Image (spheres, helix red, strand yellow):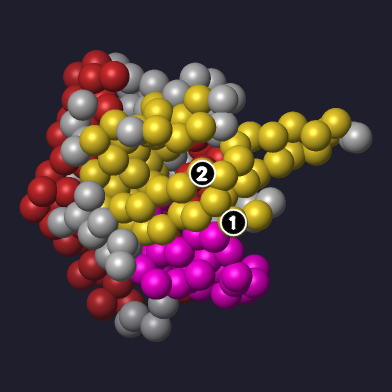
């Protein structure tokens, strides 16, 4: 059984009485440890697909299963608890809280767990070390470069040891050097820690870091 299974997924938005289909009948399987990139024009539904996988939005129809859990069948409270444990989301614009330090931003997902304060600190410092920022743990986002902020975002995404990492244009706001650092880090997470990653990107260079490239265009997903 694949780690991620998407079957006949359909998503339709409505604007007043106007029906706006995003995609229809999308199917996808991902195995444990697979690293896939997803490309497509703006408005093709790439980010929508990530949000559906993360349980942040509901499909119009179809099935999403992650690690054997039926995501589409969960209620809101169930989804919040499931997401905290199984989904690591990396955002284009980092989504760090400016009033919190790097340590505190990374710790946020662990506050929903039963870990003690000491255990949370061990987890946070471990992942900050993985992303090369253990010496920046007390820095606030405004004291970090864009690349460093994104590394904090990645540390936050992996601190709960999620089933899958969903990265939505994680290099879109970075200069070329910082982007390469982030792509190298994602590749390391995949190769060294066997993390399953789905990367949405417009950048063909970024997409090449993955095992395979998929394209979403006019509602059709293809490899």
Q: Distance between the residues labelled 2 and 1?
A: 9 Å
Decide whether residue 76 is among the magenta residues: yes
Q: Quadrant of residue 178?
A: top left
- Position of residue 212 relative to residue 111, above or below, is above
For label 1, the SS is strand
Q: How crowded is mark 2: few (under 14 residues within 10 Å), some or many (20 or more)?
A: some
Q: Report the residue marked by disc 2.
A: 26
144 displayed left or right of 56: left
The x and y percentages for residue 188 are: 12, 44
The x and y percentages for residue 135 are: 16, 47
Seen from the viewer's position, the closer of residues 47 and 117 is: 47
Q: Residues within 10 Å of mark 1 (few under 14, many from 20)?
A: some
Seen at 26% across and 77% down, the residue is 118
148 displayed left or right of 216: left
Q: Quadrant of residue 18?
A: top right
Seen at 36% across and 68% down, the residue is 67
Quadrant for the N terminus in the image: bottom left
CB atoms at circles 2 and 1 under 8 Å apart?
A: yes
Q: Is residue 103 visible?
A: no
Quadrant for the C terminus in the image: top left
Which residues fall within the magenta stretch? Answer: 63-89
Seen at 46% across and 47% down, the residue is 27
Give the residue furthest to the right. Answer: 17
Find residue 62 and name its label: 1
The x and y percentages for residue 62 are: 59, 56
């Amino acid at each position: 059984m694949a780690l991620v299974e998407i079957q006949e997924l359909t998503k339709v938005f409505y604007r007043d009485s106007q029906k706006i289909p995003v995609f229809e009948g999308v199917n996808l399987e991902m195995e444990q440890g697979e690293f896939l990139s997803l490309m497509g024009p703006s408005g093709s539904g790439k980010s929508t697909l990530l949000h559906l996988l993360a349980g942040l939005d509901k499909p119009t129809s179809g099935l999403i299963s992650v690690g054997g859990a039926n995501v589409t069948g969960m209620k809101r409270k169930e989804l919040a608890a499931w997401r905290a444990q199984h989904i690591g989301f990396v955002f284009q614009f980092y989504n760090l809280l400016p009033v919190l330090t790097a340590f505190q931003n990374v710790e946020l997902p662990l506050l929903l767990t039963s870990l003690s304060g000491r255990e949370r600190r061990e987890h946070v410092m471990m992942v900050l070390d993985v992303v090369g920022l253990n010496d920046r743990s007390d820095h606030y986002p405004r004291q970090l470069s864009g690349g460093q902020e994104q590394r904090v975002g990645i540390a936050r995404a992996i601190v709960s040891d999620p089933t899958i990492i969903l990265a939505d244009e994680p290099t879109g706001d970075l200069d070329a050097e910082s982007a390469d650092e982030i792509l190298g880090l994602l590749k390391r997470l995949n190769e060294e820690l066997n993390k399953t990653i789905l990367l949405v990107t417009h950048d063909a260079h970024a997409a090449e870091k993955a095992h395979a490239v998929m394209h979403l265009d006019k509602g059709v997903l293809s490899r």
